[in-house]
Image (cartoon, rainbow, N blue to C red):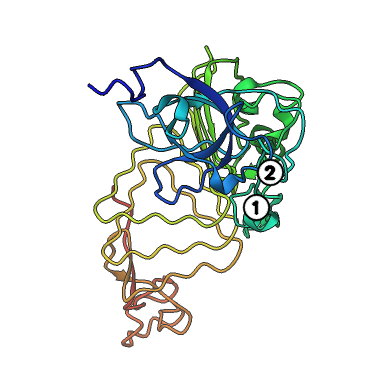
Amino acid sequence: MEKDKDFAGKNGFIWWTGIVENRNDPLKLGQCQVRCVGWDADNKMHLPTKDLPWAKPLLPVNGTEVYAPKEGDMVIGFFIDGENAQERVMMGILPNIPLKTANPQQAFADPRTATELASAPKTPKEKTYNTDGTGIEIVERDQAESYPKILDEPSTSRIARNDATSITKTFIQERKDNLVTGVETVNDTWDEPETLYNTVYPYNNVVETESGHLLEFDDTPEAERIHLAHRNGSFQEWFPDGDKVEKVTKDNYQIIMGDDKVYIMGKCQVTIQGDAELYVQGNFDMNVDGTCNISSGGTMKLNAPLIDLNDGTNGAARIGDTADTGDQGTGGPNDTNSAGTNVIETGSGTVVIGGWDK
């Protein structure tokens, strides 16, 4: 064994803390350029960000997904090559409470330029929930914000913490502010249910992405939920009692390349604010065990080669059809009944009516 070489596990364990200054790893391994406190120059004139060594992420053995820390994150790690301090490994992120905004000209800060921030993921600047059928309207930011984005607060998710002073600045409040209410049905109205968010720290497992996507696995006792939301406001949420709420803030498409079966054990109410079309390219059977009421505020049209009411055989009379007036009783071709009987003897050949026989 060569005794003059240093490597991890031979001459001790040398660890470090530092600040991520770049995560755009050209190898796409999740590496970051980290400025290590006490080991790297604290002046970018002496050691620019681009010359910092790349630090590898330490991944769990049961998963290989790479989630790189962000610029400005404080990380902790160790040197594989000992005091040479060039082979670096990140073991984890140290949460903190940032107190000042980043100065890109200084060391240990988010160094991204305005051009780089313009192409980085960013949360929507403004969202308008239109209820006229046009859907969500999003105004985007010109550029992303430097890290840290939030000062004087823990770097953990606001939704995971549920602090009264900050939860109103999250998607949870946005949902509460944009509920759809008073949806009319045939005989009733209903409202979009409000989220049952009632998180108690530390039981909510939250992922919030840089562009604004959200995933919650909330284990708070009696408030257990799963919540998946897109940055555009569309979401799905499962409530503690088994209820589910789904909202699509723009158009919705569903394609089923096989059969589709729907079984609703309770009541079904469908309200369509605009027009509706149903096109069945095969046969269409509808059966109603109870009373069937169909009402139209305008003209109702039925168009078919043959319209059969109650499995009929007798032709229905229409304006312009030949019919017995019952006044003459002359025994003509369209007058075979006695005068005054008022029995229609001929009718439509395309509309037939039968008697009710269930």
Callout 2 amino acid: Ser
> Helix or strand or loop: what does disc 2 sit on?
loop
Quadrant the N terminus occupies: top left
Toward the viewer: 148 or 176? 148
Q: Residues within 10 Å of mark 1 (few under 14, many from 20)?
A: some
Residue at image coords 70%, 27%: 167
In the rendered image, the residue lying farthest to the top is 221
User: Which x, y percent locates residue 290?
Assistant: 40, 41
User: Which x, y percent locates residue 67?
Assistant: 45, 37
> Where is 172 relative to 326, above or below?
above
Mark 2 or mark 1, earlier in chain: 1
User: Which x, y percent locates residue 279?
Assistant: 38, 65
Toward the viewer: 186 or 144? 144
Dot 2 corresponds to which residue?
146
Residue 91's disc is none
Dot 1 corresponds to which residue?
117
Callout 1 amino acid: Leu
User: Which x, y percent locates residue 218?
Assistant: 51, 22
- Residue 266 falls left or right of residue 179: left
Toward the viewer: 237 or 10? 10
